[in-house]
């Protein structure tokens, strides 16, 4: 369960730094968020590599499946008793990993909240300059229903 939670945290956290066309208003910049903190950018890059090369794509040594062969005794009629594969997954859940990832999430969350506050003030100032009639004429807030048929398509 803990391993699943840290994988989910990595996937969701790094999604915020991606370049999806669906996220075109504000993009989080790692250097800006973590550059001033000791080991901040280094930790960001480490967990990005864990996400990219282990969690999402399985391209590094954190997961391995070496193949081996068990030998029979010399006097056996055949030399190989069994060929096998051994699945080895390095655990991500350590106190150090948890603490470092928590630090990154906390720093990013503080920046996001400050940015939301800044944008909210700017939008409030802009909207306050409009008449009530103009404000009521604006489009209503809409939340689209989930379209399961569009799961493989990009949001626009």
Image: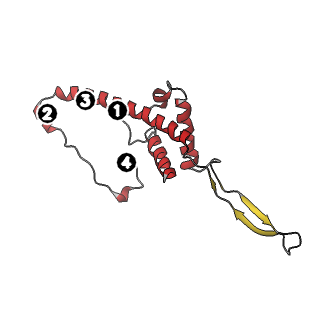
Q: Which residue is mark 2?
A: 134
Q: Is residue 8 left or right of residue 124?
A: right
Quadrant of the frame with the C terminus: top left
Q: Is residue 115 visible?
A: yes
How far apart marks 1 and 3 lie (CA) works out to 15 Å
Q: Nearer the viewer, mark 2 or mark 1?
A: 1
Residue matched to label 1 = 113
Q: How far apart are the two marked residues, 3 and 2, measured between alpha carbons?
A: 15 Å
Q: CA distance from mark 4 to mark 1?
A: 24 Å
Going from N to C along the chain, the mark reached first, 2 or 4, is: 2
Which of discs 3 and 2 lies nearer the camera? The answer is 3
Residues tagged 4 and 3 counted as in contact (Cβ below 8 A) = no
The residue lying at 37 percent from left, 33 percent from top is 112
Q: Position of residue 24 (x, y in %)?
A: 38, 37
The quadrant in which residue 73 appears is bottom right
Label drawn at residue 74: none
- Corner quadrant of residue 134: top left
Other-residue count near label 2 (Cα within 10 Å), few / some / many at <14 / 14–19 / ≥20: few
Residue position for label 3: 123
Residue matched to label 4: 155
Q: Where does the image place residue 126, in percent across and percent down from the top left? A: 22, 27
Mark sitting earlier along the chain (1/3): 1
The mark lying in front, picked from 4 and 1, is 1
């Amino acid at each position: 369960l803990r391993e699943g939670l840290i994988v989910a945290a990595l996937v969701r956290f790094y999604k915020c730094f991606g370049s999806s066309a669906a996220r075109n208003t504000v993009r989080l910049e790692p250097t800006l968020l973590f550059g001033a903190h000791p080991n901040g950018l280094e930790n960001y890059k480490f967990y990005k590599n864990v996400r990219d090369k282990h969690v999402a794509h399985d391209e590094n040594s954190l997961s391995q499946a070496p193949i081996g062969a068990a030998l029979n005794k010399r006097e056996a009629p055949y030399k190989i008793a069994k060929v096998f594969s051994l699945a080895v997954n390095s655990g991500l859940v350590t106190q150090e990993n948890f603490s470092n990832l928590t630090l990154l999430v906390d720093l990013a969350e503080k920046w996001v909240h400050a940015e939301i506050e800044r944008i909210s003030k700017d939008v409030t100032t802009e909207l306050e300059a409009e008449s009530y009639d103009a404000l009521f004429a604006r489009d209503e807030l809409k939340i689209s229903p989930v379209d399961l048929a569009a799961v493989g398509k990009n949001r626009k």
